[in-house]
Image: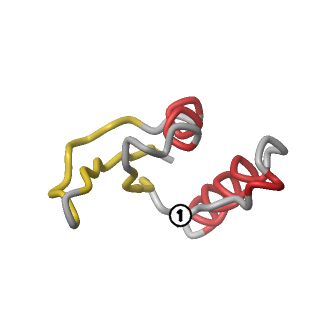
Amino acid sequence: MLVVDPVDRGTGLGHALTSECLARARHDRCRTIALHTIPIMTVALPMYLRMGFSKVHDAPPIHGVPYAVYTKAL
Protein backbone atom coordinates (compact mmCIF):
# COMPACT_ATOMS: atom_id res chain seq x y z
CA MET A 1 0.00 0.00 0.00
CA LEU A 2 1.26 3.42 -0.92
CA VAL A 3 0.87 5.90 1.91
CA VAL A 4 2.61 9.24 2.27
CA ASP A 5 3.01 10.85 5.67
CA PRO A 6 0.73 13.90 5.91
CA VAL A 7 3.77 16.13 6.49
CA ASP A 8 5.19 15.12 3.10
CA ARG A 9 2.00 15.16 1.05
CA GLY A 10 2.00 17.38 -2.00
CA THR A 11 5.73 17.00 -2.58
CA GLY A 12 5.51 14.41 -5.36
CA LEU A 13 6.62 11.53 -3.19
CA GLY A 14 3.64 9.32 -4.09
CA HIS A 15 4.24 9.93 -7.78
CA ALA A 16 7.95 9.16 -7.38
CA LEU A 17 7.22 5.90 -5.56
CA THR A 18 4.69 4.83 -8.17
CA SER A 19 7.10 5.76 -10.97
CA GLU A 20 9.78 3.62 -9.34
CA CYS A 21 7.38 0.67 -9.20
CA LEU A 22 6.68 1.14 -12.91
CA ALA A 23 10.40 1.36 -13.68
CA ARG A 24 11.11 -1.86 -11.77
CA ALA A 25 8.26 -3.65 -13.53
CA ARG A 26 9.63 -2.51 -16.90
CA HIS A 27 13.13 -3.64 -15.87
CA ASP A 28 11.66 -7.06 -15.08
CA ARG A 29 10.04 -7.03 -18.55
CA CYS A 30 6.50 -7.09 -17.22
CA ARG A 31 3.89 -6.33 -19.83
CA THR A 32 1.25 -5.08 -17.42
CA ILE A 33 1.15 -3.77 -13.88
CA ALA A 34 -1.95 -3.87 -11.70
CA LEU A 35 -3.07 -2.26 -8.50
CA HIS A 36 -6.20 -2.06 -6.45
CA THR A 37 -7.49 1.01 -4.73
CA ILE A 38 -10.52 2.35 -2.93
CA PRO A 39 -12.67 5.42 -3.53
CA ILE A 40 -11.45 7.16 -0.36
CA MET A 41 -7.97 7.40 -1.92
CA THR A 42 -8.98 10.81 -3.27
CA VAL A 43 -5.43 11.88 -4.16
CA ALA A 44 -3.96 8.54 -5.23
CA LEU A 45 -6.74 7.47 -7.58
CA PRO A 46 -6.60 10.60 -9.79
CA MET A 47 -2.80 10.32 -9.80
CA TYR A 48 -2.99 6.70 -10.99
CA LEU A 49 -5.40 7.72 -13.75
CA ARG A 50 -3.07 10.55 -14.86
CA MET A 51 -0.23 8.01 -14.92
CA GLY A 52 -2.16 5.84 -17.39
CA PHE A 53 -3.89 3.26 -15.21
CA SER A 54 -7.37 2.21 -16.30
CA LYS A 55 -10.10 0.59 -14.26
CA VAL A 56 -10.57 -3.06 -15.18
CA HIS A 57 -13.31 -4.07 -12.76
CA ASP A 58 -14.66 -3.75 -9.26
CA ALA A 59 -13.26 -6.21 -6.75
CA PRO A 60 -15.18 -7.84 -3.91
CA PRO A 61 -15.46 -5.56 -0.88
CA ILE A 62 -13.08 -6.24 2.01
CA HIS A 63 -14.72 -5.65 5.40
CA GLY A 64 -17.40 -3.67 3.58
CA VAL A 65 -14.90 -1.41 1.77
CA PRO A 66 -15.31 -1.31 -2.04
CA TYR A 67 -12.19 -1.96 -4.12
CA ALA A 68 -11.43 -1.75 -7.82
CA VAL A 69 -8.60 -3.16 -9.94
CA TYR A 70 -6.64 -0.88 -12.28
CA THR A 71 -3.99 -1.87 -14.81
CA LYS A 72 -1.41 -0.16 -16.99
CA ALA A 73 0.22 -1.68 -20.05
CA LEU A 74 3.97 -1.40 -20.01
Q: Residues within 10 Å of mark 1 (few under 14, many from 20)?
A: few
**Residue in the image at 73% along x and 61% along y:** 5
55, above or below 37, in the image? above
Q: Nearer the viewer, residue 57 or 10?
A: 10
Given the current orientation, which residue lies at the most extreme left position? 60
Residue where numbered disc 1 is placed: 29
Residue at image location 24% in from the left, 50% down from the top = 66
Q: What residue lies at 61% left-to-right and 55% top-to-bottom?
A: 22
Query: What x and y, as percent, mark residue 49?
Result: 50, 32
Which of the 4 quarters of the picture holds residue 47?
Answer: top right
Number of marks present in the image shown = 1
**Residue 52 located left or right of residue 9:** left
The one nearer the camera, 33 or 6, is 6
Does 40 sit left or right of 47 as displayed?
Answer: left
**Residue at figure coordinates x 64%, y 54% from the top left:** 18
Measured as percent of width and height from the top left, residue 16 is found at 76, 52
Q: Secondary structure at mark 1?
A: loop
Residue type at numbered disc 1: Arg
> Looking at the picture, does residue 74 appear above or below residue 50?
below
Residue 57 drawn at (x, y percent): 21, 43
The coloring applied to the image is secondary structure
Of residues 22 and 1, the one nearer the viewer is 1
Q: Position of residue 21 (x, y in %)?
A: 62, 61
Left or right, 35 with respect to 63, comes to right
